Each structure stands twice: as structure tokens, then as C-alpha cells.
Image: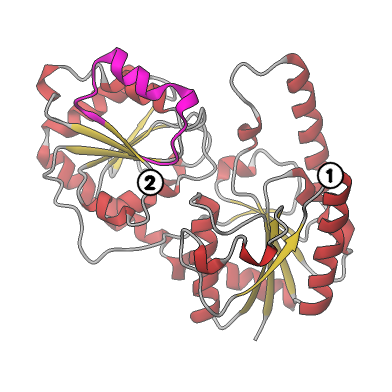
Amino acid sequence: MKKLLYITNAIDGSGGLERVLSVKTKVLTEDFGYQIHIITLSKSEFVENQSSKKDSFFPFSDKIVQHNIDVSGNPLQYISKYISGIKKVVAKVKPEIILVCDDGLKAFFLPKILGAKIPIIYERHVSKLIEISENQSFIKGIFTKAKFFMMDILAKDFTQFIVLTQGNKNEWKSKNVKVIPNPLPFFPSEKSSLQNKKAIAVGKQSYQKGFDRLLNAWALLGEEFQDWQLHIYGKLDESLGLEKQVQNLKIGHQVFFHPPEKKIEEKYAESSIFVLSSRYEGFGMVLIEAMSFGIPCVSFDCNYGPSDIIRNNEDGFLVENGNEKELVEKLQLLMKNETLRLQMGKKARENVQRFLPQNVVKQWGELFKKLSS
């Protein structure tokens, strides 16, 4: 039985990284026989109560052993506790392979901190574009470029550097970069009927997810589609002013915001179209989730992910990134053409099976075998 150690920040959140980790580690332990340990971090003195897999948003296998490191205190104390805590767990667990799932800069130093005795794999779950914010200042721009420069240098120290898409691969200069996509968290026995006049979007409210662009587009649908509804699920952020935008656009009778939904499968099953309005992505888990229910997707062709998932004009539509008018046109096409919805939905359910856990995790198993030999 091979022993794996994952290092991440937390596993109790509702984000894509937590969902992927819960699915992947469950399959590795229960289907492939791996023994898995996970290191998480806590800034609270009540360490044992933080980031528990029992209280996590997504279910983690009971076979997984969790180690929580207290990193409370000032920056120097944080760094000291981070390094000593990880070294202590590594010495105790004695893993055969270490996997790093942390998109922060600190994670890039782990090969130097731990040495080269154990293979260390880095999993990059986001694009570099996540570091670039709206109206970024000149100083912040310089800092970001310096951070990218450092990341590029440190990335070469990992035994293998895993990214999610071909576009993500092109962001990195190292020769150790390999593409392994995210696994599909579920494949339902039943699909959506595609009869309800409901469109769905899923993701936290943020600049990245571009819901402001989606609302602008929705307001352009016209009178013919006033009976269609848009439901957006994800962590709410009042500072973005999306509720006010809905009021200004006079689409409050059609658009509804909801907090993160644990039973999101039920919401997919009620929907007929999925729409992704992101400015950039790391992969796009929500796309493959929707497609598993036989739902056609309309997505901005942003960097990176949608073009690796959606087969344009076959199981969904890829729209020029930021082209709200084209987004509206594709939504209208699916809304008024039930036959097209059903055809694309059928293809979506067929094509998405390449992301089934057994297919994706098999690639990880082959990598682990290669690194252990």
C-alpha cells in the first residue's frame, strides 16, 4: 500500500479545490488502495476544531488521516510554525510521495524546505491570471511580475508539476509540467429533462466569475424570453453590487442569487442551460458537472478550461471572451430551440465521461507508479 501526503490550506471550504480533493482522495483510498494523509493549516488556537473533514462542505473518506498545523501569530511565527509543522508530519508519516495543493507562493518553497529525498508533486488548480485584479496598480503589477518570476524558478524544483489544461501548461516554462484534468465528482443515473425554463450559473461572486457580464447579457434577452429564469449559486459578496445591478437592469423578476448549495446536483437536474461568464478559469469544474446531467453549456472562451471541456457547436457553445452580445445570441438559440437543447445535452452527457474519476485517477496512479519505480 502506497502512502501519500497532501499539503493544502484547508478542506472545509466550498471551492473547486476542496471538491476535487474530496473526489480524488476517495477514489485513491477506496478503489486504488492508497493510504492518504492530509496536512491542513489553522490560524486558530483551537486547532483540533478547524478544517475538519467531518465538518467539510464536501464529503471526505473516513480512511483519510488529517493533520492540522497551528500557524497562528505574526508572519515570522506563521513561517516558523509552517516549516516545523510540515517537517514534523513528514517525519512521522514517512510518505512515499508528497502532493502540494496550495496556489500560494509559500508552497513553491516546499522542495527546498523538505529536500529531494521524497518525490514532490505540485498541483496547480488555478491560472496565473488569478493574480491579476481589476484596475491593478503599477506597483501591484510590478509585484505580480516578480512573483511570477520567482514561481517560474521554483517550479523547476518539483519532481512533477501538474496543471489542468493545455492552456495552463503554456503558462509555465518548466519541462516538468504535465496535464491531468480534474475528475467529475458525480455522474447521475438520471439527466435533466431540459424542459424547465431555467438557466444556472455556479461560482462565488467575484471579479473572476464575471457575473456582472452575465447580468448585462441577460438584460438583452428581450420580451420573448421573459419567462426564463437565471439562478446563480455561490458565495455572496455584497461589495460587488450585483443585486443593485439586477435592480438597475430591471431583471429582478428573472434573476435569483443563492448561497453555496451542498445538494447542487438537485439544482442542475432542474435546469436546462448552464452558463459560464468567467473572465478566466483554472479548469471549470461546474461545466463538467452540468454536462453530466445532459445540460448544454454556453461559456465565454476564457483562459483556461472551457475550450478543453466544451466541443463547440456539438455539446455547447464557446463565445468570444467578453462578447456579451454573442453570449445572448447563443442563449436565445438554446432557449427557443428545444430540439437543439436535447441534441447538445445528449452529446454533453456522452462527451463528459472522459472526466469520470476512474479515468482521471488512473492517470494519477500511472504517475505515482512511475515516480516510485
Identify the residue at image location x=28%, y=42%. 314
Identify the residue at image location x=73%, y=58%. 45
Q: Are marks 1 and 2 in contact (CB under 8 Å)?
A: no
- The segment highlighted magenta reads 233-255
Residue lying farthest to the front in this orientation: 46
For label 1, the SS is loop
The crowd level at tag 2 (other Cα within 10 Å; few <14, some 14-19, many 20+) is many
Please give the residue where the numbered disc 1 appears in the rendered image. 74
Residue 135: x %, y % from top left: 61, 16
Q: Could you tell which of marks 1 and 2 lies nearer the N-terminus?
A: 1
Identify the residue at image location x=67%, y=47%. 103
Report, in whole angstroms, how far the alpha carbon at label 1 lies from the one at label 2.
40 Å
Residue lying farthest to the bottom in this orientation: 1
Residue 230 has which mark? none
Please give the residue where the numbered disc 2 appears in the rendered image. 287
Q: Is residue 27 left or right of residue 75?
A: left
The crowd level at tag 1 (other Cα within 10 Å; few <14, some 14-19, many 20+) is few
Tell me: residue 39, above or below residue 128.
below
Quarter of the picture containing the C terminus is: bottom right
Q: How many marks?
A: 2
Quarter of the picture containing the N terminus is: bottom right
Identify the residue at image location x=55%, y=53%. 17
